[in-house]
């Protein structure tokens, strides 16, 4: 049996992780993330110069979406922002809610997968 969704975030600091991109495709939504790994995580490496965290790329993939609400915020910056800070993050069963600098994402999906590169 596979790991639960919650256990896949062991030793990952979600509050310091960032969103890189939101990709919508048919009934799927993919969130490209930079996960902030804590020292106890097996993939942890000392952060590079000028970095606050050991960032590790990954994705959250949602399939079989039955409810989806995206509320994108205006960033107001002239340059393209590459990382969006996360304010709120919650996965409970088939429901997912996140508030971040990019905007608010609320959904219900048949499948929620956590992938790391």
Image: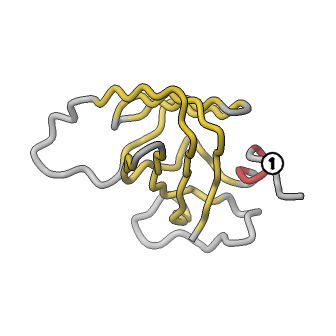
Residue situated in front as seen by the camera: 108 or 48 = 108
**Viewer-proximal residue among 45 and 43:** 43
Q: Residue at x 46, y 50 (%)?
A: 31
Q: Quick one: which residue is furthest to the right in this view? A: 1
Instruction: Residue at 71% x, 30% y: name it.
Output: 92
- Pointer 1 local density, CA inside 10 Å: few below 14, some 14–19, many at least 20: few
**Left or right: where does residue 40 sit relative to residue 22?**
right
> From what the image shows, is residue 43 above or below residue 15?
below
Q: Quadrant of the C terminus?
A: bottom right
Residue 82 picture quarter: bottom left
User: Residue 44: image x %, image y %?
Assistant: 66, 70
Q: Is residue 29 left or right of residue 60?
A: left
Residue 88 percent coordinates (x, y): 53, 30
Render colour scheme: secondary structure
User: What percent of the width, then of the height, locates residue 8?
Assistant: 74, 53
Which image quadrant: the N terminus?
Answer: bottom right
Q: With respect to residue 80, does 39 lie above or below?
A: below
- What residue lies at 82% left-to-right and 55% top-to-bottom? 3
Relative to the observer, which residue lies in front, 11 or 107?
A: 107
Q: Which residue is mark 1?
A: 4
Could you say where residue 101 lies in the image, as x and y percent from the top left? 35, 35
Residue at 73% across / 54% down in the picture?
11
Q: In terms of image quadrants, where is residue 89?
A: top right
- Left or right, 74 with respect to 19, comes to left
Classify mark 1: helix, strand or loop: loop
Q: Residue furthest left?
A: 78
The image shows a total of numbered marks equal to 1
């Amino acid at each position: 049996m596979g790991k639960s969704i919650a256990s896949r975030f062991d030793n990952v600091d979600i509050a310091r992780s960032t969103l890189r991109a939101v990709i919508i495709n048919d009934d799927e939504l993919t969130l490209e993330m930079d996960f902030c790994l804590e020292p106890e995580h097996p993939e942890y490496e000392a952060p590079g110069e000028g970095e606050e965290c050991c960032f590790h790329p990954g994705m959250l993939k949602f399939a079989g979406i039955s409810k989806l609400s995206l509320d994108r915020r205006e960033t107001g910056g002239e340059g393209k922002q590459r990382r969006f800070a996360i304010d709120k993050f919650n996965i409970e069963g088939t429901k997912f809610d996140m508030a971040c600098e990019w905007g608010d994402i609320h959904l219900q999906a048949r499948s929620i997968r956590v992938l790391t590169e």
